[in-house]
Structures are given as structure tokens and as C-alpha cells.
Amino acid sequence: MKIFIIPGGGENTDLKSYKDLIRGLRNLGYTVVSINPKWELPLSKQIFKVGKNDIVFGFSRGALLAYMVTKKYPCKSVILASMTPLRNFSKKAIYNYYGKESADNLLKIKFVGNKTPKVHIAGELEEIKADIYVPRTGHHLTKSYIKYIINLLKNKGD
């Protein structure tokens, strides 16, 4: 089974934490596809195709892209890890952080109509609504966060 990994904003999958996640997923038998967005470009212009049996994992801002991808291309599942909670920020703050074009696209995201099953994960120290909370973890892809993801995906390959 194929899993797409999208890191957080400004990050890439060459960072140690993502390499550890990728190694763990490969040990489970997954074919891992690293997606390294060009963070200076609007996410809406970086949507890529996935198959109906694939899984997409995105962390933080990467979770926003994962959501957008799976809304256009339904797949087996999407894991939204520590997804940037746009609703917690003012429009001005979103424009200041992301820039006009990216902010315009992000603010158009409608979090309805996505047929792909979703799992929301967050660190328990974050102020993000989620299905699963990783104990004693904030907004970082830590070893314990990676362990939760690996355990979650152990049986998804069936």
C-alpha cells in the first residue's frame, strides 16, 4: 500500500523526524512517497493525484494540503496531524503569515464534502480539536507522535 507524507510548513521530509516516520512505515510494508511542497507557492496549486487505495498523511500546514488533495482525489484515508487550525486566527493574521495568494486559497477551503475517511491527531498540549491526542506532546513530530502514527497504521494496510 502507498502512503504519501507531507511535512509541516517550511519543513521537508529530509528532517530526522520525517526520516524516522518513513523508516517505520517502510518497516510496516508501506511504499512511502515523500511530498515536499514549495511552501512559497499556494497550496491549491500543489494538489497531486492519489489512488483510491492510498493513504495521505500531512502534518500542520501539510495537513491542509493533505485535506485539499483528498477532497479532490478520494482515497482510503487521510491522517491530519496537528492541522493548522485556520478558524483560530484572524483573517489579518492568516494574510500576514501566508501571504495574499496562499491566504486567499486557504480561506476558500470548505471542510465539508470530503468523502475520504479522516483521522485528526494532535499533541495533547495543542489547542486543536482532534480524534487522537498524543500525550505530553505539542506541535512537533516527536518520537511519541511517530509511535502513535505507526501504531495507527499497523492494520490499515490490510
Image (tube, rainbow, N blue to C red):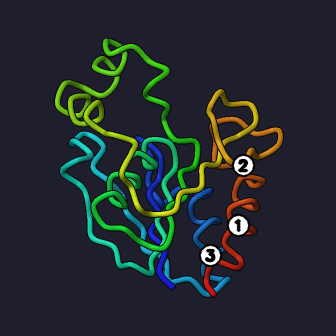
Q: Are marks 2 and 1 in contact (CB under 8 Å)?
A: yes
Q: Which amino acid type is shown beneath numbered disc 2?
A: Ile
Q: Nearer the viewer, mark 3 or mark 2?
A: 2
Q: Nearer the viewer, mark 3 or mark 1?
A: 1
Q: Counting residues from the N terminus, which is met first, the one under dot 3 or under dot 2?
A: 3
Q: CA distance from mark 2 to mark 1?
A: 10 Å
Give the image location of residue 18, x and y in percent. Answer: 57, 60
Q: Counting residues from the N terminus, which is met first, the one under dot 2 or under dot 1?
A: 2
Q: Which amino acid type is shown beneath numbered disc 3?
A: Leu
Q: CA distance from mark 3 to mark 1?
A: 11 Å
Say few, some or many: other residues with alpha carbon within 10 Å of mark 2 (under 14 / 14 to 19 / 20 or more). some
Q: Which amino acid type is shown beneath numbered disc 1?
A: Leu
Q: Counting residues from the N terminus, which is met first, the one under dot 3 or under dot 1?
A: 3
From the viewer's side, name the closer residue of 114 and 152. Answer: 114
Q: Of the numbered discs in the image, which one, if any, rests on residue 65? A: none
Residue pointed to by mark 3: 25
Give the image location of residue 78, x and y in percent. Answer: 50, 61
